[in-house]
Image (cartoon, rainbow, N blue to C red):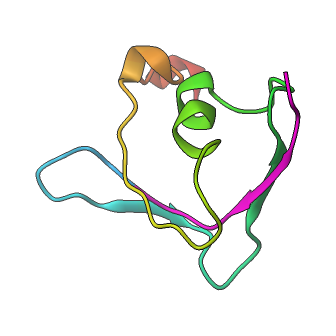
Amino acid sequence: MNHKVITLEYDLYKDTSDGEMIESTKGKNPLVFLSGSGQMIPDFESNVSDLEVGEYFSFSIATENAYGKRKEEAI
C-alpha cells in the first residue's frame, strides 16, 4: 500500500434532525494522519484518501462502522 500524509479540515455533525455540529477543525489545527497506518476509522480513510487538494466532500459513516453505539456506562 502507498502511504501518504493526509491533512484536512472538517466539520463533524450529528446525524439527527437538528444536525448539531460536534466539532470543527476549520481555522484551528487540521487533522493530519498517515494513510494505511490504522490511525483512522477505515470508512473515514477510504472516503478521504482519493480526494484532490482543495476538494470539498461530505459523507456519513454508519454507527457500526465507526465507534459503535453510545454506552453511558463507558463515559
Q: Which residues are magenta?
A: 1-12
Q: Is residue 18 above or below residue 62?
A: below
| 65 to the left or right of 45 | left
| 43 to the left or right of 57 | right
Residue at x-position 42% and y-position 58%: 57
Residue at x-position 23% and y-position 58%: 19
| 55 to the left or right of 62 | right
Return the x and y of residue 25 as percentages of the image width and height.
62, 70
- The quadrant in which the N terminus is found is top right
Q: Is residue 38 above or below residue 54?
A: above
Residue 52 is inside the magenta segment:
no
**Residue positioned most to the bottom:** 27
Q: Is residue 13 above or below residue 59?
A: below
Query: As rendered, which of 34 and 24 lies closer to the eye?
Result: 34
Give residue 42's quadrant in the image.
top right
Q: Is residue 75 above or below residue 30?
A: above
| 9 to the left or right of 73 | right
Residue 3 is inside the magenta segment:
yes
- The quadrant in which the C terminus is found is top right
Q: From where the camera sits, is residue 69 visible?
A: no
Number of numbered discs overlaid on the protein picture: 0
Return the x and y of residue 14 as percentages of the image width and height.
32, 49
Q: From where the camera sits, is residue 30 visible?
A: yes
Residue at x-position 56% and y-position 35%: 44
Give residue 31's quadrant in the image.
bottom right
Return the x and y of residue 71 as percentages of the image width and height.
46, 19
Return the x and y of residue 7 as percentages of the image width and height.
76, 60
Give residue 29's quadrant in the image.
bottom right
